[in-house]
Image (tube, helix red, strand yellow):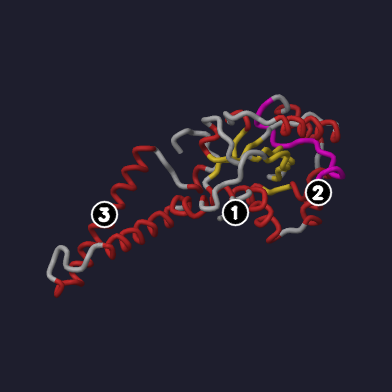
């Protein structure tokens, strides 16, 4: 009934709100035009590690529709409670199509790609699953190139379900709203005479707020959970 959420489509919506394909290509072209001897030295130092933050792409062969800035990736990760981590933390299996595309890119751009990143739900960095991972390679200056997307699209309700965990303010509002709904569900006069409805409502609301808030906080601390804004690049299991 409800269409599932395609993460690439969501990234494109964020991306094209403020930028155009021409602007993106100009920015990336500027990045490549400013690679000097100092940058070459840095690249040589980190060429063999997973901390690679730059790949020597051929600007003329890049597809602007697949270039995303870290801020655009961050926004999607926060909205849908996703992680954006080094590929070495990914516990799933890369599909053949992804490996094939990496080889094709390396041949087309005559380079050895490194520093891969994957955007996916937290569970995919611990368990084998298939829930819309996206594979990126760094271009430089906080820009990333989308290599491949695989798996199933996200549930259309994931953004709504993860909204309370987006920020601390969202979490508090969710508890206040949940307590209000819970209070309205209790029949009038259930605890006190109906003549004291206002007093009963206020006391019951405070009880509901403490009850729901207490359970939520206990669960959060017990599980070591954190908010979307804090975990989207965290490599720790309990975040």
Q: In front: 2, or 16?
A: 2
164 in relation to 53, above or below: below
Q: In front: 133, or 168?
A: 133
Q: In front: 169, or 178?
A: 178
**Residue 24, position as x, y percentages in the image:** 77, 53
Q: Is residue 164 magenta?
A: no
**Residue 133, position as x, y percentages in the image:** 62, 39
Q: Can you tell which mark lies on residue 30?
A: 2
Q: Can you tell which mark lies on residue 3?
A: 1
Q: Describe the element under mark 2 as helix, strand or loop.
A: helix
Q: Describe the element under mark 1 as helix, strand or loop.
A: loop
Horizontally, residue 40 falls left or right of residue 188, namely right
Q: Could you give the CA–CA distance between mark 3 and mark 2, rounded to whole angstroms?
A: 54 Å
175 in relation to 49, above or below: below
| Residue behind mark 3 | 210
Task: Determine which quarter of the picture holds residue 197.
Answer: bottom left
Please tell me which of labels 1 and 3 falls first in the chain. Answer: 1
**Mark 3 Cα within 10 Å, few/some/many (few <14, many 20+)?**
some
Task: Determine which quarter of the picture holds residue 16.
Answer: bottom right
Is any atom of residue 29 visible in this view?
Answer: yes
Q: In front: 4, or 195?
A: 4
**Mark 2 Cα within 10 Å, few/some/many (few <14, many 20+)?**
few
Residue at the image point whose x is 34% and y is 60% from the top: 176
Residue at the image point whose x is 52% and y is 46% from the top: 81
């Amino acid at each position: 009934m409800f269409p599932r959420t395609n993460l690439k489509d969501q990234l494109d919506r964020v991306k094209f709100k403020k930028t155009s394909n021409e602007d993106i290509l100009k920015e990336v072209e500027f990045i490549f035009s400013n690679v000097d001897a100092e940058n070459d030295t840095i690249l040589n130092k980190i060429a063999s590690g997973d901390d690679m933050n730059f790949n020597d792409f051929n600007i003329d062969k890049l597809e602007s529709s697949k270039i995303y800035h870290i801020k655009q990736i961050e926004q999607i990760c926060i909205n849908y409670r996703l992680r954006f981590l080094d590929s070495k933390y990914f516990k799933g299996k890369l599909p053949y199509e992804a490996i094939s595309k990496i080889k094709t890119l390396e041949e087309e751009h005559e380079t050895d790609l490194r520093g891969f990143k994957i955007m996916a739900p937290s569970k995919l960095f611990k368990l084998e699953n298939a829930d819309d991972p996206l594979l990126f390679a760094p271009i430089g200056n906080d820009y990333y190139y989308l290599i491949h997307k695989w798996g199933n699209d996200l549930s259309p309700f994931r953004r709504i379900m993860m909204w309370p965990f987006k920020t601390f303010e969202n979490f508090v509002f969710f508890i206040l709203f949940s307590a209000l709904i819970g209070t309205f569900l209790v029949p009038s006069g259930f605890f006190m005479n109906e003549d004291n409805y206002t007093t009963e409502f206020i006391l019951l609301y405070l009880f509901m707020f403490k009850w729901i808030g207490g359970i939520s906080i206990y669960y959060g601390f017990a599980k070591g959970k954190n908010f979307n804004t804090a975990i989207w690049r965290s490599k720790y299991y309990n975040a």
